[in-house]
Amino acid sequence: MLNLQGYGPAIVQGTVLTIELCLVSLVIAMLLGIVTALAKLSRSRVLNLLAQTYTTVIRGIPDLVLMLLIFYGGQVFINQVGPMLGYDAYVDINPFIAGVLTIGFIFGAYMAETFRGAILAVPHGQLEAGYAYGMSRFLVFARILLPQMVRHAIPGFGNNWLVLMKTTALVSIIGLKDMVRMAGLASGATRMPFTFYMVVAVNYLILTSISIVLLNWLNTRYSAGFIKD
Amino acid sequence: MDFSIIFDNIGIYFEGLKNTLALVSISLVIGLIFAIPLAVLRTSKNIFISGPIRVYVYFFRGTPLLVQMFLIYYGMGQFEPIKASFLWVFFKEAYFCALFAFTINTCAYTTEIIRGAIENTPHGEIEAAKAAGMSKLLRFRRIILPSAFRRALPSYGNEIIFMLHGSSLASVITIIDITGAARIVNSRYYSPYEAFLTAAAFYMSITFIIVWLVKKLEFRWFAHLRRE
């Protein structure tokens, strides 16, 4: 049997942190994604330009570079701005926050593209009908647009989620104790790097597989009532 | 912000650019060369042929590239037979390990892309080829693969960009690519904005060039489907 030499619990802790990280960044990514998608489709040219710049820039830069920029750059920024606001203590950026913000920020751009497509897929007449009933813009969004766009968004959303999960491995580089980092620590002490990284790899495979099953289920549920050819 | 430190150290960035381009292009080319036969075999009905390829693709698409790279760079040293053999000459080199990891990673993704394209070949085309008396090999060479490449091109363009961005991980195992150059400049001057924004500018320029090239290629390859 697999002998982890007492490092099993550490890997489990790391796995829990990885899952937390995934979920929190997903929430940020979805919020940013929907706001950006709406900005892209809005009539305001300033909003269009802002959203377009955001998604283009993010997709042109590697995740790691952005993460290092936010982690190291954020540190410098806070410690330059802090004293100006009368706050003198040296601040260390929490790597969890840096990681979550970066990943959320990156995948917000990808989610925006997915959501934009999904919004456009909802027939315009549906929205017009909502307005004709005297619904406010928010009500039309919440009652008509959102429920119907979910179905179109699920496939793209699923892809983004799978990529997002794998991207969380990068936080180990900025010192967050996720499962990759834990495996690194354990393999340093036991000289069994292959074993520990393999355990982590299998963990990722399990997370991916569970996600795929859930996504398929969601897809079937939301496609109920639509004929498939 | 003081970008004069970047001008003083621009040499490191160009050194990094060279390494990034070499890593990405070599792994993409080797990955593509292996992916084509793998994708063809993956469509086989014999489960002993398609099964192992399926597992390979599943593993490398389902785990982070960083973990794959660590498995190779740190992991191989765990096995005495490898350390004792000639293979160690390669596996002790960070550069080779990064290249190896990138290659098998991109090969897995490319296999999946080409497989999808092969399976989407219109049935009539294959039937027509059969009716014309073509052998299986000839069908693949003349009918299935050329049209599959065309259909795979947009996704493969994304894969090239994905690989370019993934290559920044090489900096984690001591290689001086563009990101590695930025990390050196950052640690030397403690100036993260200048260092990483310059790296970001490099990556963005390469990304845009790749996007432009793929668009151009698409324009050519889809010429017969264009409406005047």
Image (cartoon, coloured by chain):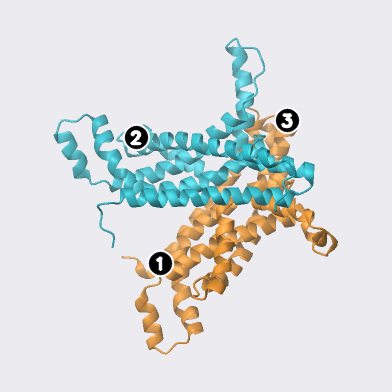
**In x, y percent, where is residue B90?**
78, 60
For badge 2, the amino acid type reads: Arg
Contact check, label 2 and label 1, Cβ < 8 Å: no
Q: Residue furthest top?
A: A86
* Label 2 environment density (alpha carbons within 10 Å; few <14, some 14–19, many ≥20): few
Subunit ID for the residue under disc 1: B
The residue at which mark 2 appears reads as A45
Residue A93 seen from this side: yes
Label 2: chain letter? A
Which three-letter amino acid code belongs to the residue tagged 1?
Phe
Q: What residue is drawn where x is 50% and y is 41%?
A: A57
Disc on res. B189? 3
Instruction: Check disc 1 and report the residue beneath it.
Output: B222
Asked if A6 appears above or below B44 in the picture, the reply is: above
Q: Is residue B33 above or below residue A177?
A: below
Seen as rendered, the residue at the extreme front is A1
- Asked which secondary structure carries label 2, the reply is helix
Chain identifier for the orange-coloured part of the image: B
